[in-house]
Image: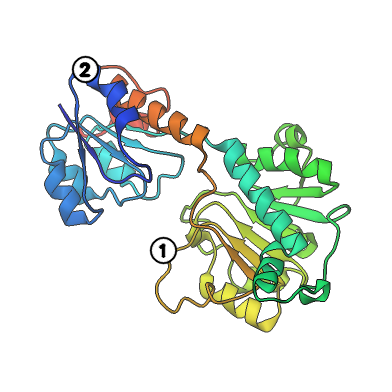
Amino acid sequence: MRVLVTDYAWADLSVEQSVLEGIGVELVAAPDGSESTLARLAAGASGIMTCWAQTTERVIQAALPDLKVVTRYGVGLDNIDVACATARKIPVAYVPDYCMADVAEHAMALLLALSRKVAGFDRSVRGDVWDIQACQPLNRLTGRTLGLIGYGRIAREVAVRAAPFGLRVLTTAPSLTPATTAAGGAEAVTLEVLLDTSDYVSVHCPSTEATRGLIDANALRRMKPTACLINTSRGDIVDETALADALDAGEIAGAALDVRVVEPPGEGDRLIGMPQVIHTPHAAFYSAESLIELRERAAKETRRVLQGEEPENLVNPEYRREGG
């Protein structure tokens, strides 16, 4: 059996191979993530394991009739044509809870860096400017308000970490209940109230038709001129042109972005050049511990299906009813 690995962000596939070699799987690593390359290499593959590369209908179709499973290294599914897989009776598996602590810690690190102007002071000192006044204002976090857009596993981890800093935590999500909000100590409000009230707005919702472009010009205008935006979720939830315009106009004070619509951003990107924006390279999920867990669990999900079992984390249970 062959399993195509479309892309990965680590040195090798030794962890995956150690899980799959016992059932006679050969891993094939794609040299690039272009659709034509992936479609060519998918022919005859029993499984596809994908990180960020677009696993399109063409790629999935190219693997038929041998394809038995598509596995996502991680949480988001916006790079997989799940509808196509479902229609072809192919289960899609993922690893929804491997990096909750890591992303929550990264979001808090970005929040603290914005609050204490860490990146700005670092640039100033490296530029031979030793001046407390170089990056003002500085405000304590205690008594400030953090708004979480979305309240899934990661957002709840952020809420738990925010409380010891004396932050009031607001949240908004379609499926909130008193029980889920109470679990992390957050207060449920409407999106409008969250934007109006929060000193820091942190994005934690998935990328869907309903959320793409959610943080647009109107949303940014509702935020305080002293407020900052943090995004560790998906780049397309934020209208990047509107964000750059809002920062230029002083409608908000700053932003910290771990995710972008295009990764890496192209030459001349406006946000990259803005001193009030902190950037990290889609690194929130990344830690030595989380990567080992992610790779092992993704490979085990693939192995389960190839051995005739159901994955533990099945995205599309309706695949059994589709395709005739």
Task: Farthest residue to the front: give it.
Answer: 128
Image quadrant assignment for residue 279:
bottom right
Q: Which residue is mark 1?
A: 264
- Report the Cα–Cα distance between label 1 and label 2: 37 Å
24 or 316, which is in the foreground? Answer: 24
Left or right for 191, reference 46: right
Identity of the amino acid at label 1? Pro
Q: Position of residue 182 (x, y in %)?
A: 77, 34
Mark nearer the N terminus (1 vs 2)? 2
Residue 190 visible in image: no
Q: Position of residue 187 (x, y in %)?
A: 79, 45
- Residue located 40% across and 76% down the image: 267
Image quadrant assignment for residue 153:
top right
Q: Which residue is mark 2?
A: 23
- Residue located 36% across and 44% down the image: 51
Q: Secondary structure at mark 1?
A: loop
Task: Farthest residue to the bottom: give it.
Answer: 249
Q: Position of residue 106 (x, y in %)?
A: 62, 48
Q: Please say if 188 is above or below 277.
A: above
Q: Please say if 16 is above or below 246.
A: above
